[in-house]
Image: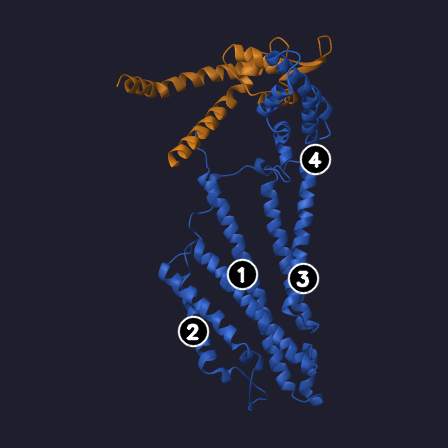
Amino acid sequence: MFNMMMKKTISEQYLKLTQELRRGILVLAALSQLKEEKYGYALISSLAEQGLDIDQGTLYPLLRRLESQGLLQSEWNVEGSRPRRYYVISPEGSRTLVDLASEWRNLTNVMEKLLDDISSEGEQNESN
Amino acid sequence: MSLIDRYIQEVGRHLPRKNRADIKAELRSSMVDNLEDRYGSDPTESKVADFLKEFGKPREVAASYFPEGQYLIGPSLYPLFRMIAWIVVSAVLGAQVLAWGIAIFVAGESFSALEIFGSLLNSIPVSLGWLVITFIILQRFDVKPELDDEPWDPRSLPQINENEDIKRGELIFGLVFGILILVLVTFFPQWIGFVTTPGGKFYPNPVLIQHLGWIKVSLLSGIVLEIYLLWKGNWSLIPRIVKIAVNLLSIGVLALLVQGHNAWLAARASTGFFEAIEAISGIKDGGWELVGMQGFRLAFVIALIVTVIETLAMFYRMARGKIQTRTIKNLPPVSA
């Protein structure tokens, strides 16, 4: 019983940690996919196709926040089967995207080095 | 789609009026896109219910649009609120103690402990309530204080443990004085009083004799704390809390003594200091007794005010110390 509770707590904790980790990259991911205009669900599908699943409850408020910060522009389009709000990156958003992408590459380089030992430990554990 | 519409309506109830219609329309359009993609154009009610469950509780979805809107007083305003709340409580208490001091000593009025407690119970929540209302309005209008923009110098940070060391001399003096008074009230209670006329007969203070038990408890608790502090050599959280409790007990006993003197003087129709002076000239009998009792009352009122101020200062120091400790613990790692 105690072990089950501990396992549950650890898995909940792990879930929270991964959510936190993903939250940090959402802005970069969203900006990178909005060079062409997309509505909310199309963006989610596009990211999911490329392997990044994003919670809808997180993405929609994020798009609005990025718009209020001037990084995105949006407008309603009533031409399809139902009205949809389309988002596209703004000129300021494009500049920010370049900077963020460069920052991301630096970070991944550093993290790769930092995690190098952990990968080799994992491989050793697997071989044992 | 009635479940979807009911869901959107519920989310809308928790959204601020501004942008509500727009967010609801966008949310509905996105949800319908998602539903159609998963279950086709005519999903069953149970599929829609599962989908909505996965989407999240309406209140939580609404909250994710306005994280700041979830606070009555948000994180950016709270430090300012806490600082002003301390100032307001101290000012209200200080003003009230001053008003009582003037009313009791100068105007000769008398208050019961219940009246004093009742008026505190009224004035502090009312002033704090107004402060909270003011900050709720500031929060609603998204006002952000610029306290953090001031330049600061790390060298101006307070010294660690500077206030933690005890002042040994002060403590020993207080201890000796406390023990002397305790010996006096325990073994020679009949000596606590005053001489009614120069070279005349001694008059024991009846109010002090009446409340000897409480006076001893108050003195003893102070002495025990001072001995503990001398032994430990520094202040920490527990002794500070005990000191505040001892001070609160002293405030209660002093209030009891002031009230006792008021009742004694009121029974002899002497409520003001000047009346007592007038009585010395022989217009009224027992003039020196009245002056003596007025003198005792004055001493207790001053002691009461000093103890209240000291207790408030301790509360303030404790709160400030807590903030500083937290700030030091939460400092991010030093970057180049």
Amino acid on which the number 1 mark rests in the picture: Glu
At mark 2, the secondary structure is helix
> Which of the two discs, 2 and 1, labels the residue nearer the N terminus?
2
Residue B170: % across, % down: 44, 65
In this picture, is A67 found above or below B257?
above
N-term mark: 4 or 2? 4
In the figure, the blue chain has which letter? B
From the top left corner, tell me how far across and down residue B12 is, in percent. 70, 28
C-alpha separation, residue under disc 4 versus residue under disc 2: 58 Å
Near mark 4 (Cα within 10 A), the count class, few <14, some 14-19 or many ≥20, is few
Parent chain of label 3? B
Q: What residue would you read off at disc 1? A: B310
Q: SS for tag 3? A: helix
The lab-note entry on whether marks 3 and 2 share a chain reads: yes
> What is the C-alpha distance between the residues marked 4 and 3?
34 Å
Q: Residue at x 69, y 85 (%)?
A: B279
Residue B141 is labelled as 4
Q: Are marks 4 and 2 on the same chain?
A: yes
What separation in Å lies between label 1 and label 4 (alpha carbons)?
A: 38 Å
Residue at the disc numbered 2: B179
Q: CA distance from mark 1 to mark 3?
A: 21 Å
Q: Is residue B283 above or below residue B124?
A: below
The N terminus of chain B appears in which quarter of the rendering? top right
Badge 2: few (under 14), some or many (20 or more) residues near its Cα, within 10 Å?
some
Within 10 Å of disc 3 (Cα), the crowding (few <14, some 14-19, many 20+) is few
| Amino acid type of the residue that numbered disc 2 sits on in the rendered structure | Ile
Q: Amino acid at mark 4?
A: Phe
Mark 3 residue type? Ser
Q: Chain of mark 1?
A: B
- Residue beneath label 3, please? B119
